[in-house]
Image: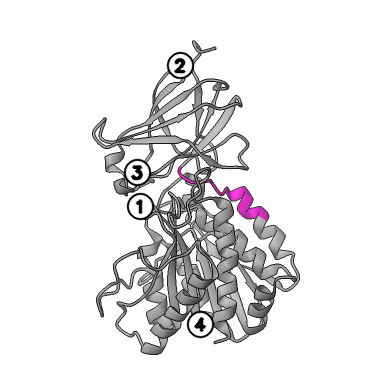
Amino acid sequence: MSEFAIHIDSAFDSGNIEVRAIHGATATLAIRRDAHSDFFQWFHFRVSGAAGRELVLRITGLNAAAYPGGWEGYRACVSEDRDYWGRADTAWDPHTENGTLTITYSPESEICWFAYFAPYSMERHHDLIAQLAAEPGVIYRRLGQSLDGQPIDCLTMGDGPVQIWLQARQHPGESMAQWWMEGALDALTDPANPHGRLLREKATVHVVPNANPDGSRRGHLRTNAAGVNLNREWHDPRPDRSPEVLAIRNAMDETGVALCMDVHGDEAIPHVFIAGFEGIPGITQAQLASYHRYLAILDAQTPDFQTRAGYPIAPAGRGNLTMATNQIAERFGAVAMTLEMPFKDHNDLPCPDQGWSPERSAQLGRDCIAALAQWIMG
């Protein structure tokens, strides 16, 4: 069978790859840029006709990717059933064909899938929304619609006075953020989970599982259908370029915000960490102390979090108010934070088979809810 060429497809939800050449079981590939944008790094494609053969998949031109530093030490995600996602042998060479990532894998099945991280499809998103909207005590709201006409879905639960907002996937290629949401929503809606029960008693929790459905479906890394980075729109969202942010921020204006967690993934840093709002002009010591208290609680809650590695802290008064965390902290006097999970692995507790995974993302969501329950008790 080795004389036959493999087939590579990506014309599906969140698919992204360009085929430059195929010779037998070896392919030369490139990643398509986000529409109307220079961003690219997300890939997701299917290979067929490969059972029992060693695949050699070369993705080229990656020095021009959004975060070329993310390729060093990275291993591609692979699945033969689209349920369990492991990691394939992966080598990075910045000097060949403007940066080449070579993925080597020998599947048992005729079909296998490769992705930058385990995909979270829009169909799974709709299943999640449908399932949870039918749960007792959960209120569904359509906050608005995207440029492609997809709904901006929000689930609200609890009747306490503290307004908590959780949102994910402003950057659509960071699919670990929606796996996190599955875990968080499981904790919040499970009647046997004491942390979720406590939060629903003490707080009203608003959850936006996917803030960028267009980018998610189109296979973008970082932008919406207009090529706009939504996490740089929070100072002045407009209906013609960032209606997703406008819809969410308007809803926040109606309720107020005591705490917001904006969930993301980081390409380069092999750790789970949180970035705060230290640089906003209106910061208060009480606000900062409450933020650090949450970090300490989560650090004690799970070894899948740490506080040593992360982003540099912005100098006083220099916080970027176009970003959700800074704008929300400044606008509402809220405790706001950006949770980052790795595309690589959490090196404090590495997993050779899967690296950072959907399962660990979901478990971290549950752990973050448990930490929120402690936080809200003061």
| Amino acid carrying mark 2 in the image | Gly
Rendered image quadrant of residue 279: bottom left
Residues in magenta, as a range: 116-127
What amino acid is found at the position of numbered circle 4 in the picture?
Gly
* Secondary structure of the residue carrying numbered label 1: loop
| Amino acid at the residue labelled 3 | Trp
Q: At numbered mark 4, what does the secondary structure look like: helix, strand or loop?
A: loop
- Which amino acid, by three-letter code, is at mark 1? Ala
Task: Look at 63% across and 50% down and name the residue there.
Answer: 124
Q: Is residue 102 magenta?
A: no
- Ranked by sequence position, the earlier of labels 3 and 2 is 2
Residue 117 within the magenta-colored segment of the rendering: yes
Q: Residue under circle 2?
A: 24
Can you give x and y, in whole percent of width and height, for residue 242 in the image? Answer: 42, 62
Q: Mark 1 or mark 4, which is nearer to you?
A: 1
Q: Left or right of 47: which side holds 220?
A: left
Q: Residues within 10 Å of mark 1 (few under 14, many from 20)?
A: some
Q: Position of residue 313 (x, y in %)?
A: 30, 71
Q: Residues within 10 Å of mark 3 (few under 14, many from 20)?
A: many
**In the rendered image, which residue does mark 4 sit on?**
256
Labels 2 and 4: the sequence-earlier one: 2
State which mark lies toward you, 2 or 4: 2
What is the C-alpha distance between the residues marked 1 and 4? Answer: 34 Å
Q: CA distance from mark 3 to mark 4?
A: 40 Å
Can you tell which of label 3 and label 4 is closer to the viewer? Answer: 3
- Identify the residue under disc 3: 71
Q: Nearer the viewer, mark 2 or mark 1?
A: 1
Residue to which mark 1 is pinned: 268
Residues at marks 3 and 2, CA–CA distance in whole angstroms: 26 Å
Residue 263 shows in the view: yes
Where residue 26 appears, x then y in whole percent? 42, 21
